[in-house]
Each structure stands twice: as C-alpha cells, then as structure tokens.
Amino acid sequence: MSGSPHARILGVGAYRPRRVVPNSEVVGGIDSSDEWIQQRSGIRERRFASEDETVVAMSVEASRGALAQAGIEADQIDCVVVATVSHFLQTPSAAALIAHELGAGAPAAFDISAACAGFCHGVALASDMIRGGSARNVLVVGVERLSDITSPNDRGTAFIFADGAGAVVVGPSEEPAISPVVWGSDGAQSDLIRQNTDWRDAVNAKDGEMPHLVMEGAAVFRWASFEMAKVAQETLAKAGLTVDDLDVFIPHQANDRITSAMARTLKLPERVKIARDIAVQGNTSAASVPLALARMIETGEAKSGDRALLIAFGAGLAYAAQVVTLP
C-alpha cells in the first residue's frame, strides 16, 4: 500500500447516551448547588450511559455515523484506533470488538490510553499511518463510561465526568488537512489526575468498592490554562499558521473556565467559534473533542473547509494538539 502525501478527516460521528443528568441529580452527594457547579465548570447537565450503552455499543454507533459521512463502507477500514480509559477488559481490545461489530473484516485494531488527550493522539497516529502507507482509511474513536469510575461523593469530580463516544474516519488527501502533532507528557505531575486504587487492591478490599478517579482541580486548572496555550501556539507555528488563520477552536471539554482562559491567552479573534459542549455533555475525557466537533458541525457553528485547532490534555499529564481542516 503506497502512502498518500497528506491525510484528512473524511467523516465525523457521535453517540450521546440517552439519560440526561442535570446538576440537581448530583448536588446531593457533594453538598453543593446548581449555581456552584455552573460557576466552577460551566456544566448544566451531562449524559450517563445505561447498562446497554457499553463502550463498544456507543463506539459502534458513533463509528457508523462517521463512516456514513465519509461515504465509505466498514470493510474499507484498514485500522481501528480506540482511545479510552474505561474499557474494563484488559484484553481483548475494545477496538477489535468494535471492528467486528461494524463488519470491518480484519483491520489492525488496538486501544490507546492517553486519557483526555487520547483522541488527538489517535488522529496523529492515523495521519502518520496514511502518509506512511500502512493504512488508507483509519477509524479513530474516543469513548468513555466515566460514570463507572466516578464517586458520587467526591466534591472534586462527581459533577464533572460523563459518558459518550465520538469517531472520525481519517483518509488520504492531496492537500495538507491535518497538521503535524505537538504532543507530550509530564509524568512528574501524574498524581494530579489518577485512579485512586490499584485494581488488585480493589479486588482484595473487603468493601469491594470500584476504583474511582481523583483530581487536584486547582492545580490542573493552573497547568492547563497556561501550559496548554503554549502548546497551542507551538502547534500553530508548526503548521505555519497564526490565530488569524483559524475558524474554530475545539479544546478538550474539561472546564469552561479553562477554555475561556486559553482563548484569552491565545488572543483568538472574536470571529473564531469556540466549542462549549461541556455545558450539556460534561467532561467525557477521550470522547470530548470528537463530541464537541460533532456538535459544532451539527449546529452549523463549524462548516466544511473550516480550519480547526484541536487540543486536549489530561491524566499523565498527557497532551496533544493539531490543526485540521473539517470535512
């Protein structure tokens, strides 16, 4: 298989769980209020998956939407990359199961764990595969069921995390449409967002409580608000662009205040549309960027040919960013 000079996103799909959970349903466990949650995060409501809305099931539905928009069949997919931290089978991968459910034949299929930055990592890998000739069409999925690993009594996380899936098909392009990625990690600060208990300790514990996510919110806010603006600027420079060349800004939907702080630091022009999907979706980690992208396309805020800056950051502390041309 010969490589393509460039790669692009051909189609976008999304799946949002049926159950809408307003702030009023989560305030009791954390002795809080709707006003406090909105002021702190910008979140009004989020989606929680029901029993049948598994990681695989949500991914399959999102993927079907991406395939339909791309105008290709499942058996034309050469690789499936799934970004998630909430597929609780160590093996087989969610990617292999999703490929099978889609009827994709026998593509390469694997999961990656880069937390909230996972989807942008996946897009970078897909672009490199296509340009290198190891794949022609790559399905990239970001999916989470964070409600399974969120404590309803943790004041720092109970109102933040949620569930959903987003997917894109990445394929060949004659023109540059996915910029070089800027990515990295800061393991020295890995304790800022983490799972509270080793799975082995959880299994051996008398109470049998499910491990859950814990986060040092103030420290993450400071790090993301300023360090990620630098990453965004480096990404634009690597793509040979400036903020004036952007049409859309789609950051990881971690906290609306972080999004606003980044936009101010970058000095984004007022005409640039900014994703605010967190207000009705919550923080869905690896799924947040594709879900926010899908909503902007659905609402008409973003249109075909627009140039969008994607940037995501999360546990690890991992981050990744690239500029893409929208399908």
Image (cartoon, rainbow, N blue to C red):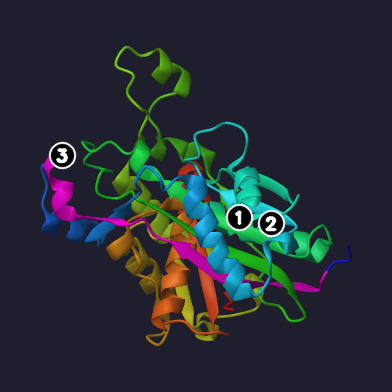
Q: Residue 166 appears at what percent x and percent y?
A: 49, 60
> Which labelled disc corresponds to residue 29?
3
Kind of residue at badge 3: Gly
Q: Residues within 10 Å of mark 1 (few under 14, many from 20)?
A: many
Residue named by callout 2? 125
Residue at 11 percent of width and 42 percent of height: 28
Q: Residue 72 appears at what percent x and percent y?
A: 68, 71
Q: Residues within 10 Å of mark 2 (few under 14, many from 20)?
A: some
State the SS at label 1: helix
Q: Nearer the viewer, residue 39 or 269?
A: 39
Left or right, 176 with respect to 119, comes to: right
Q: Nearer the viewer, residue 78 or 276?
A: 78
C-alpha distance separating marks 3 and 1: 34 Å
To which quarter of the image does residue 119 belong? bottom right
Left or right, 220 with respect to 239, comes to: left
Q: Determine whether 233 is above or below 56 in the image.
A: below
C-alpha distance separating marks 2 and 1: 6 Å
Q: Residue 315 appears at what percent x and percent y?
A: 46, 43
| Magenta residues (range) | 4-30
Mark 3 vs mark 1: give the one in front. Answer: 3
204 falls in the magenta region: no
